[in-house]
Image: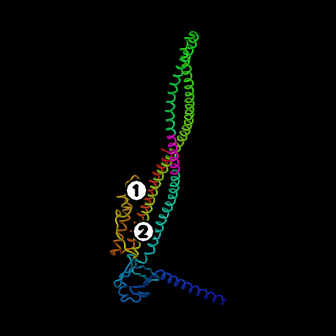
Amino acid sequence: MFGNKQLQLQISQKDSEITELKKEINLYQSLLNLCLHEGFVGIKNNKVVFKSGNLASLNNLEEQSVHFKENAESVNLQGVSYSLKSQNIDGVQYFSLAKKTGGVGEYHKNDLFKTFCASLKEGLENAQESMQYFHQETGLLLNAAKNGGAHSAEGLGTVNKTGQDIESLYEKMQNATSLADSLNQRSNEITQVISLIDDIAEQTNLLALNAAIEAARAGEHGRGFAVVADEVRKLAEKTQKATKEIAVVVKSMQQEANDIQTNTHDINSIVGSIKGDVEELKSTVKNNMIVAQAAKYTIYNINNRVFCGLAKLDHVVFKNNLYGMVFGLNSFDITSHKNCRLGKWYYEGAGKENFSNTSGYRALESHHASVHAEANDLVKAVQEDHITDSKYLEHKVHLMEDSAKHVKENIDKMFYEKQDELNKIIEKIQKGE
């Protein structure tokens, strides 16, 4: 029994030690959460009971303890402004201090920096998305340009062939015209010769008949008729000669008629070829026109996409510079929403002309103005060292980020509205409407 009591006593002592150890661990953990760059101070009943870090070397810290308030966020010691964070541990109010830099205390930098990183990440992702879209559209444009080039080359070949056919047709038509004129002239000559032959043949027959009759009757006195008979013979010879000439002329005419017939067939074939070429050329030119017009609106769409992406990226850089100023990393120039790239495009450039019919464009202005207004207010407050409350800083940042979010949304909305409009135009062009 005595052994059991002794064991219980030992267990109780160990439990007590464990409890005290847990308290010490919690204390150190709480102190660790407070511990920052400059150190911390413990105050109880307006007396400094603990100090560490760089604060341990500060003079007159005891006299300054009245400025350490539980709900205070900052304190000024020997001309240096410190951010303040406090926690009560076992009746001692511990204060952790850090020098203020760049308009905001160290305690609030982590939260703001997270917001900054998230904002930057979102902006870069949007820029990446825009560039990916640009790459896809460029690929489509390249294919359209290749097809257009092929159609143009095909059209040029067709036009050249048509020109050659037309030139050949012109030459053959010239030959056909000359042959037609010659044929007409020879036809007239044949008519005249045939008429002459008819007359001569008729006269020859009559003379020959008369000569034979008279020669038979006249006897001795018919010698004169012998002369007539001789003339008839000569006339007959002339007739034969004329007949031969007619044969030559007719033969020549027949050859020329054959040539005309051949040329006519060639002309018909060429004309048929030209007709087909012209139809093909018409189709090619029409395709080229459709491709060219569609490519124009595609380029227009890409240009809009690139600018909208650039405008969003500009505001990512704008916010990046603003956060850099808040963290004391760089300077920042106050800019009106009408003087930035998006503002100039909105009020003076192609924005009003091309996008004013979209709801996104109309909704964009107020949010864009708010981004610059909140940012400019924040810059003035930081530069003039008017920030005494971190909540004011966070409030301004959140207002600016919220407006920037709406700027991005309305830029995208504006673009997609215009894209739908352009796609409908392209669709009509491709349908030939």
Q: Where does the N terminus fall, quadrant-wise?
A: bottom right
Q: Residues within 10 Å of mark 2 (few under 14, many from 20)?
A: some
- Considering every residue shown, the one lying at the far front of the view is 220
SS class of the residue under badge 2? helix
Q: Which residue is nearer to you in this view: 258 or 116?
A: 258
Q: Residue 57 appears at what percent x and percent y?
A: 40, 89
305, 124: nearer the viewer: 305
Residue extending furthest toward the top = 217
Residue 247, x across and y down, in percent: 57, 28
Amino acid, disc 1: Tyr
Mark 2 or mark 1: whose residue is earlier in sequence: 2
Q: Is residue 393 above or below residue 239?
A: below
Residue found at the very far left of the displayed protein: 384
| Residue denoted by label 1 | 361
Residue at point 37% right, 54% down?
A: 353
Quadrant housing residue 305? bottom left
Q: Is residue 167 magenta?
A: yes
Write down the quadrant of residue 81 in the picture: bottom left
Which range is magenta?
152-171
What is the x, y in percent for residue 208? 56, 16
Kindly report the secondary structure that dominates the magenta region of the rendered protein.
Answer: helix
The crowd level at tag 1 (other Cα within 10 Å; few <14, some 14-19, many 20+) is many
Q: Is residue 407 left or right of residue 267?
A: left
Say how the picture is coloured.
rainbow
Q: Is residue 20 left or right of residue 68?
A: right
In the displayed structure, 249 sits above or below 10; it is above
Q: Which mark is residue 317?
A: 2
